Image: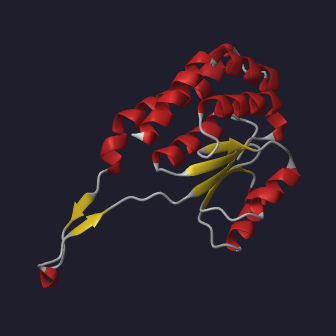
Amino acid sequence: AARLDALRKLKNAIQKRESEIIHALHSDLGKSEFEAFETEVGFVLAELSHTIKHLHRWCEPKEVPTPKSCTIAHGSIRYEPLGVCLVISPWNYPFQLSMTPLIAAISAGDCAVLKPSEYAGETAQVLERLIADTLDPGLCTVVQGGREASEGLLAERFDHIFFTGSPEVGKVVLRAAAEHLTPVTLELGGKSP
């Protein structure tokens, strides 16, 4: 119930701030209103709608068969939160690639630290206000800054790291995660991959 409540609040807040988000995307990247909605805001709203619709089913324990040698046993898969996730997002889709990993983290019952790209500054500011005004700071917080902020975050222990960006920075993220054996999701690209 708490996860659904947070997701619904997030969806409502994005709908209310749609023009502010689109304006920031235009300022940072020159995206037209259509492109900003289609590839960022609308994409995130669709992800939220889909997640809200299916979350109960996704969270249900799954019964699994047990071997005949364990006839008195009962088997099931129960999904549990990891803990605190770090999301480091890129400049080229600054809203979408910040929010979709955050939606996944909240859906899984995790808390998150969101580090938006400093190269999309207006969008990062909108994200920070949106999160601060909508979600409990114990559920999600936004950290602004450049390379030093990222390095400082990577020195901390997280339960999962989601990074989108270049292979070079992905290697830095993976090395930092290895110090704590932190699971990592890397979405690596670069210019014209």
43 relative to 125 in the view: left or right? left
Image point (73%, 43%), residue name: 192
Residue with the most extreme bottom position: 69
State the residue in front, 9 or 171: 9
Q: Position of residue 70 (x, y in %)?
A: 16, 82
Q: Quadrant of residue 32?
A: top right
7 relative to 54 in the view: left or right? right
Q: Is residue 3 visible?
A: yes
State the residue in front, 119 or 32: 119
Image point (80%, 42%), residue name: 144
Q: Does 36 sit above or below residue 90?
A: above
Q: Position of residue 64 (x, y in %)?
A: 22, 65
Q: Is residue 187 visible?
A: no
Q: Does 191 sit above or below residue 64?
A: above
Q: Position of residue 84 (x, y in %)?
A: 60, 56
Q: Does 105 sit above or below residue 33?
A: below
Q: Position of residue 20 (x, y in %)?
A: 70, 17
Q: Quadrant of residue 133?
A: top right
Image point (53%, 40%), residue name: 103
Q: How many marks?
A: 0
- The N terminus, quarter of image: top left
Image point (72%, 34%), residue name: 128
106 relative to 119 in the view: left or right? left
Q: How is the image coloured?
A: secondary structure
State the residue in front, 78 or 120: 78
Q: Does 180 sit above or below residue 92?
A: below
